[in-house]
Every structure is written in C-alpha cells, then in structure tokens.
Image (spheres, rainbow, N blue to C red):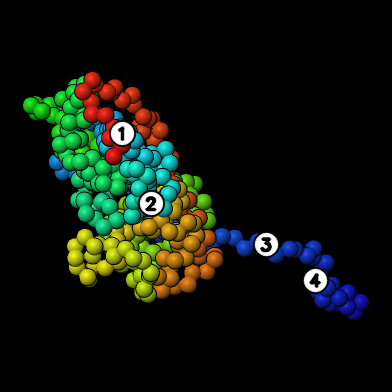
Amino acid sequence: MRWIWMTAMLAACGGGETPTTPAEKPVETPKVDELRAKAGAMFGALPTEMLAEGRELSDARIALGRMLYYDARLSKNHDVSCNTCHDLATWGVDHAPTSTGHKAQKGGRNAPTTYNAAMHIAQFWDGRAKDVEDQAKGPPLNPIEMAMADAGAVETTFRSIPGYAEPFKTAFPGEEQPVTFDNLAVAIGAFERKLVTPDPFDKWLGGDDAAMTAEQKAGLQTFMDVGCTTCHGGKALGGMMYQKLGLVKPYETADRGRAALTGNDAEAFMFKVPSLRNIAKTGPYLHDGSIATLDESIRLMGSYQLGKDLTDEQVNSIATFFDALTGPIPTEYIAKPELPADGPATPAADPS
C-alpha cells in the first residue's frame, strides 16, 4: 500500500521530471517545394539579359552605350548624364524624391531604377516610351532634365567629338553617318538590356534552399497571401501593368498619371506598377518619392490598393522577403569607361 501511495504522490508532483521552458515559437515556413512551384509559376527567375526583337546586343553597341550613359555632354550644360539620376553604383537611382536636372530644376516624378527595367511593359511612370531605346530619347530633350534644343543639337555635339567616330562606326557598320540621335538611343538601350541583378530569390527558385532564410520564405508566403501579387507579378515582380493609385479608396495626389498623357479620364491616377527587384535599396517610393521608408510603403499599399490594414508582423514579414530581392551590383559591367575628349569644335556648355 505504501508503494501505491508513493507512486500516486510522484505522479501528482510531476513524477520528478525537470520543468522545461517553453520553446521560442519557430518561424512557420511553408512546404518548400509547394512554395517554390507556386512562386516559380507566378514570378520566375530573372534572365541574364533582356532581349527584344530587332534589338541587337553586340559588344560594340554595349560598349558605346556604356560611354554615352556616363557622358554629361548629353545635356545642354554638360553637367547631367543618365547616371546622374540613375546612378548604377546605388542600384540605379539617386535616392531623391525627384531628381535635379538642368539649372537645378526638379523633375515632377521620382526617377525609377534602370536595373531590370528593359523587361517592363513600357518605360516612365506613365508608359509614354515603348522600350528603353525609346526612353533614352526623352531626357536629353526634356527642358527640365538635360535641356538640349533638339535631336540635331545632340548630333552636332557628338559628331564634333573625334573619339566617338570610331565607336559609332563599329557599333553601326555600313552606315554613311552612324552618329545619329536614333543610334545614340539604341546604344544606350543595348547597354541597359544587360543591367540585370540576379538575387537570392532567383537562386532559391533555381533549387538552392539555403539561398533564402526561413523568415524570407515566410515573407514570400505572406506577400502572396495578402494579395500583393494582384499587381506585382512576372519576373520583375511588377512593371507589367498599369494600376490606379488608390484602387479601393482615393489616394490624394495632384498627378493624374496616364490621364495626363492620354487625355482619358478613365486612366486618371493610373501609373505603371513598379518592379520590386532591389526595392529595399531604391527608396524613396511612389511616383512622387513621397514615401520615405519601405515599411510605410508596404502599409500604404495594403490600405489603398488591397483595402487591408496590415499588421506590424505582416509588414515586417513582407519587408524581410524584399531583402531577398536585392541583387549585387555588377561592378565590372558598370565600370565607368574613359570618355572621349572634346574636339576643337565641340559646342561649349550653354549656361542659359
């Protein structure tokens, strides 16, 4: 009887087992294979180059385009280059709400990154350029950005620089006068079509389970679950459609988006959906650069585009996934080349 009594007492006191501290709640990671299959179908990995029919990516055109991208003689005062606003050393942006152009004028919209941009449906926030080659013609002739008088002024400048004659001839063989405004834009576009930044997400999609952390995989699941993929799909996680800013409730902005371009009121406040590649490095955010932080941008998108008040946990989870979309800067490819010296007849910078 005493043995039975002792056994009962031990059982009541926990049998003498050592108390344990509750384990910290692990990050819930979805089944990896299922998540990868779903993400692969919805997004896909970045290509090594962004090809397009009729756009040749010869070494000669890329080399010329690299020089032109860095050459400030594309601007009236010889002080603004493509790289001024789209700095390749800082993920293709200048981190300003809107960029500074000719005579310190401020642009009306935030300068988007040139990395991975050639795969977008169109260029500029309102889609007014069909591709990166067409886009390259815009800033030189914009009175706020580079302020050149016209295409002829650009051609006069670069034809007067002796060191450009051979690179243009090599890039566009067989042309009687290869130094043209059109060819200049084609060369810049060729260079930009290889501005690709593969990242940990791409490695993970390719089968490397260790390329993303458990928290980043959970963030990817959150990103898909809350509905961000309604707009941010494709290899660039965006850039493939236009969407109204303030889809489920009005968002206050004076910029009418595509409607200002097309005159169609149905497109009021519609902008090209930005890519999320390198998004953690390319703030500030939105078309006007009015949102300073990534967390604030995620929260705002949840509210105005999805009609959801995202929790702090959800915002942090999505932002953690976005870290996996940051690719290394291709330092060798973007290295600034030596630019040809002015010729004796090169038009001088015009301070007006």
Where residue 244 appears, x then y in whole percent?
31, 67
Inspect the image, locate mark 3, and give the three-letter code of the amino acid beneath it: Ala
Front label number (2 vs 3) = 2
- Which residue is most to the right? 2
Between discs 2 and 1, the one toward the N terminus: 1
| 138 lies above or below 175 | below
Between discs 2 and 3, the one toward the N terminus: 3
The CA span between labels 2 and 3 is: 48 Å
Inspect the image, locate mark 4, and give the three-letter code of the amino acid beneath it: Gly
| 212 lies above or below 69 | below
Q: How dense is the environment of label 3, judged by Cα within 10 Å: few (below 14), some, or many (20 and up)?
A: few
Q: Mark 4 highlights which residue? A: 14
Q: Which residue appears at 17% of the width and 31% of the height?
A: 156
Between discs 4 and 3, the one toward the N terminus: 4
Is disc 4 placed on a helix, strand or loop? loop
Inspect the image, locate mark 1, and give the three-letter code of the amino acid beneath it: His
Q: Which residue appears at 49% of the width and 46% of the height?
A: 210
Where residue 243 appears, x then y in whole percent?
30, 65
Q: Mark 2 highlights which residue? A: 98
| Disc number for residue 78 | 1
The CA span between labels 3 and 1 is: 63 Å
The CA span between labels 1 and 4 is: 82 Å
Q: Mark 3 highlights which residue? A: 23
Q: Is residue 108 visible?
A: yes
| 234 lies above or below 4 | above
Check whether the beta carbons of the residues at disc 3 and disc 1 lie within 8 A of each other: no
Is disc 1 placed on a helix, strand or loop? loop
Where residue 271 appears, x then y in whole percent?
29, 61
